[in-house]
Structures are given as structure tokens and as C-alpha cells.
């Protein structure tokens, strides 16, 4: 996810913590509950100089996902994934990127305070870390570079969670990640890496089932505001997007075919059938020259105010909806591949964009909805310059996402 998007997500989580009413929080109980969480933050690496002229970044962004079970209010288990990446420098020049992914089962020990509203906790576990070299830079042209392996990794940490509602927790976490013994070979010289790091994150966690007694028409959301987080894919609708320029899926595309899409927003359901939403999103297709291949990524970021027409059924538990809006899109050339430097690929621009679509939400709790959404992004007239030749690029795309909406406030009585 782009740093600008991560910053906006962090601000949304902070706003949720500040505005959520404490009155809706119930005391912790001892029944078994399932949970899932999202974390966004920074990785601080403890060893930047890896020896033999190889260096890595001191810090970078990271994000994580977790699934688990609270066995009771004191003990839980969860499966935590975390992902980040660093630039590799060798002999003073950038040669490529190094992606790091961990999958760690861990135990969570909690000590609830203030009737369960505030919970300090400890976490620890042992799992796997997978690292992979990719996205070769200009400095890596012609070099033999191999780095792709999986090793044992472990983590231990502390955190503090505040219950925004009975089934919603937000807070912060600090973990120490031990990840060593990863091998990389550059120009026939093999060496092992020490990637120990401190992970600092803001975290949001959802718990099921909901314990509170729900009032009549609890699943209707009229008069409530929400934050939404979405993930999925963007499929550019045209293969040829400019004069001799093709759009291809990025190197990290889902299934090698659909570019990853991260989106989030904030909204307000101001009437029984209508709401407004400010939506942010971003994805990065690759630009390719016929006969040459990929030359760069062409990242698209959009901000779109949208009107949502909602049609709740089954007591508000199921909510089909339509949406449409007009906003602003920003595109930029990034992660240039070796051919891009010779071709002189450059360009960034701001243009008006539009979106139409629809989706379906299912209220799994009185304040949490899971859903699917299908949209069409209209993005045209984006600037691009190749070899001194200026042109415009069309980036219309089909957007397919799944996500969660988290509601705050009290529904307007029906």
C-alpha cells in the first residue's frame, strides 16, 4: 500500500478511537469469541549493514492481518501475518527490492482493566518468515542476484487495546521480530542476513459474536457514520492505453492477472435509503512497450465523494446498494525498470475521475458489515511522456473488492 494511503488509514483509525462513545462498551466476559485484526505501522530494522557491501533500509512501512480466538478474557491464540519490504544497496547503488513476509501462530495473554474497556496484553510465538528478491533496479542490471527462501521466525511483544464498542477494539502494539539466516547470493557470493526488527503498529480488532442486547431495528444504520476498509483487484479494461503503450498486470498482481487494490473511506447514512461516502483507493498497473516488455509502474490514486442509495431488507441485516460519484485522480510513474531509463519514461498528472457501481453488505453484528463491491472507475486524459513524446493515457478499470464497514453512533428510530 502506498505511504499516502497508509497515513489516511491511520487517521481514520485514530478518528474512530476519538469519536466512539464509551457508553456502548460492555464488560468483558469469559465466553469464547472469534476475532480478526488489521495493523498498520513501521518496521525498524536493527542491522542495516549486512556486510560485504550490502545494506538495507533502516525503516519502512508494514501491515499485518490476524485471525484468532479469545478462549476467555485472559488467554487467546491467533495467527498473525506481517508484510514489508526494503531496498537493497550493494556497493553504494540500489540493485532491487527485498520483500519480507511472516506467518506466526502466537499466544495472547491479556489483563483487562476498567471492566474490560482497557486491556494491556502480551503476545509471543514462533512461525515462518519468507523473503524474496524482486523488482530489479538500474543498479542491478547485469548482476546475478538470487534471494528466495523460507526460515524460522519468532516474535514477542506488548500491546494496549481500548474497546471502542463491545466487539471493536483499537490500540497500539510493539513487537520484536527475530528473523535470521536468510540467504542471498550476489555475483556468486552467498551471505546470510540478520533481519531482526521492531514492529510498531496501530491495530483494529473485531470480535464475534456480539454480546450486547440489540434494540429493535438494531441492524438499520440510519443516522450513523462509519469507516470502511476494502481490498481486492483492479482490472484495466483496455490492453492498449496509449500510443504504443500497453497496460499489463503489476509484478504483485493477484494470480498474475489483477492488480492489487487497497481502498478505504468514511461515510454517513443520513437517511433510510441514502448515504454519502468519501472513498480513497490506489492500484498500480505496469506500462509495457511492445517488443520490450514492462518499463515502469503507473500508479493511480483516487479520492471520490460518492452518493450511496441503500435498499435494506430482512430487518436491515442485508443491504444491497448502488453508488456513484465524481472526484480527483492522481497518477505517477514509479518503480522504473531498466528499459525506462533509456526510453525516458516520466509523467505525473491530476485529472477528474468518476465511479459507478454497486455492492451487498451483510450485517454480522449491529455495528459491523461485511460485503462485496463491484465498481467501474473512469480515468482518462492522464499525462505520460516517453522519449520526449507527450500523450494521454486512459486507465478505465473494473474494481472488485471485499471489505468491512464499522459503524458508530445510535441508529435513528424508525
Image (cartoon, grey):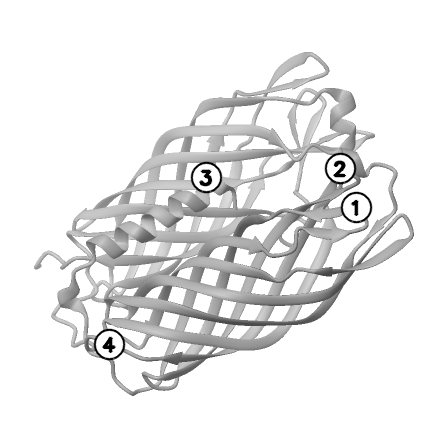
Which of labels 2 and 3 is toward the front?
Answer: 2
Mark 2 / mark 3, whichever is N-terminal:
3
Q: What kind of element bears circle 1?
A: loop
For marks 3 and 4, give the one nearer the viewer. Answer: 4
Residue that label 2 marks: 92
Q: Which residue is mark 4?
A: 113
Give SS at disc 4: loop
Residue at the image position 22 percent from the left and 47 percent from the top: 268
* Rendered image: mark on residue 4: 3
Please give left or right for residue 375 compared with residue 48 in the image: left
Between 93 and 225, the residue placed more toward the observer is: 93
Q: Disc 1 vs disc 2: Cβ atoms closer than 8 Å?
A: yes
Q: Residue furthest right?
A: 188
Could you tell me how far apart the alpha carbons at marks 4 and 1 are, in whole angstroms? 50 Å
Q: CA distance from mark 2 to mark 4?
A: 51 Å
Q: Give the mark nearer the N terminus: 3 vs 1.
A: 3
Task: Point out residue 242 in the picture as x, y percentages from the top left corner.
Answer: 64, 23
Q: Quadrant of residue 184?
A: bottom right
Asked if the residue at tag 1 contacts the one at tag 4, i.e. Cβ–Cβ closer than 8 Å, the answer is no
Q: Which comes before the other along the chain, label 1 or label 2?
A: 1
Q: Earlier along the polypeptide chain: callout 2 or callout 4?
A: 2
Q: How many angstroms separate mark 2 from mark 3 (CA)?
A: 28 Å
The crowding category of the residue bearing disc 1, from other C-alpha atoms within 10 Å (few below 14, some 14 to 19, many at least 20), is: few
Q: CA distance from mark 3 to mark 4?
A: 35 Å
Amino acid at each position: 500500500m502506498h505511504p499516502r494511503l497508509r497515513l489516511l488509514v491511520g487517521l481514520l483509525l485514530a478518528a474512530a478511537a476519538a469519536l466512539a462513545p464509551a457508553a456502548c462498551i460492555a464488560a468483558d466476559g469469559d465466553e469464547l469469541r472469534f476475532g480478526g485484526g488489521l495493523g498498520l505501522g513501521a518496521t525498524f530494522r536493527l542491522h542495516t549493514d549486512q556486510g560485504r557491501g550490502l545494506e538495507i533500509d533502516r525503516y519502512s512501512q508494514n501491515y499485518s492481518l490476524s485471525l484468532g480466538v479469545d478462549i476467555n478474557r485472559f488467554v487467546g491464540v491467533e495467527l498473525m501475518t506481517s508484510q514489508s519490504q526494503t531496498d537493497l544497496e550493494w556497493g553504494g547503488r540500489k540493485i532491487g527490492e527485498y520483500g519480507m513476509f511472516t506467518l506466526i501462530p502466537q499466544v495472547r495473554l491479556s489483563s483487562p482493566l476498567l471492566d474490560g474497556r482497557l486491556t494491556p496484553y502480551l503476545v509471543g510465538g514462533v512461525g515462518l518468515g519468507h523473503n524474496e528478491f524482486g523488482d530489479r533496479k538500474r543498479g542491478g542490471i547485469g548482476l546475478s542476484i538470487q534471494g528466495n527462501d523460507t526460515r524460522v521466525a519468532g516474535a514477542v511483544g506488548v500491546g494496549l487495546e481500548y474497546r471502542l464498542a463491545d466487539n471493536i477494539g483499537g490500540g497500539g502494539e510493539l513487537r520484536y521480530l527475530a528473523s535470521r539466516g536468510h540467504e542471498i547470493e550476489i555475483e556468486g557470493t552467498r551471505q546470510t542476513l540478520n533481519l531482526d526488527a521492531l514492529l510498531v503498529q496501530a491495530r483494529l480488532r473485531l470480535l464475534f459474536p456480539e454480546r450486547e442486547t440489540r434494540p429493535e431495528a438494531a441492524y438499520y444504520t440510519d443516522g450513523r457514520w462509519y469507516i470502511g476498509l476494502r481490498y481486492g483487484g483492479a482490472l484495466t479494461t483496455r490492453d492498449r492505453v496509449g500510443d504504443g503503450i500497453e497496460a499489463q498486470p503489476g509484478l504483485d498482481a493477484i494470480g498474475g492477472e489483477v492488480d492489487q487494490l487497497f481502498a478505504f473511506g468514511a461515510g454517513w447514512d443520513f437517511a433510510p435509503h441514502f448515504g454519502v461516502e468519501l472513498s480513497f483507493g490506489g492500484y498500480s498497473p505496469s506500462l509495457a512497450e511492445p517488443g520490450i516488455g514492462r518499463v515502469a509502474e503507473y500508479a493511480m490514486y483516487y479520492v471520490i465523494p460518492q452518493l450511496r442509495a441503500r435498499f435494506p431488507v430482512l430487518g436491515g441485516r442485508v443491504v444491497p446498494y448502488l453508488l456513484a460519484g465524481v472526484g480527483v485522480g492522481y497518477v505517477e510513474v514509479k518503480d522504473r525498470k531498466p528499459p525506462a531509463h533509456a526510453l525516458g519514461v516520466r509523467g505525473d498528472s491530476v485529472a477528474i475521475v468518476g465511479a459507478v457501481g454497486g455492492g451487498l453488505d451483510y450485517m454480522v453484528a449491529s455495528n459491523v458489515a461485511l460485503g462485496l463491491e463491484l465498481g467501474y472507475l473512469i480515468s482518462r486524459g492522464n499525462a505520460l511522456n516517453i522519449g520526449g513524446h507527450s500523450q494521454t493515457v486512459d486507465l478505465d478499470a473494473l474494481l472488485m473488492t471485499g471489505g468491512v464497514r464499522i459503524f458508530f453512533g445510535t441508529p435513528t428510530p424508525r
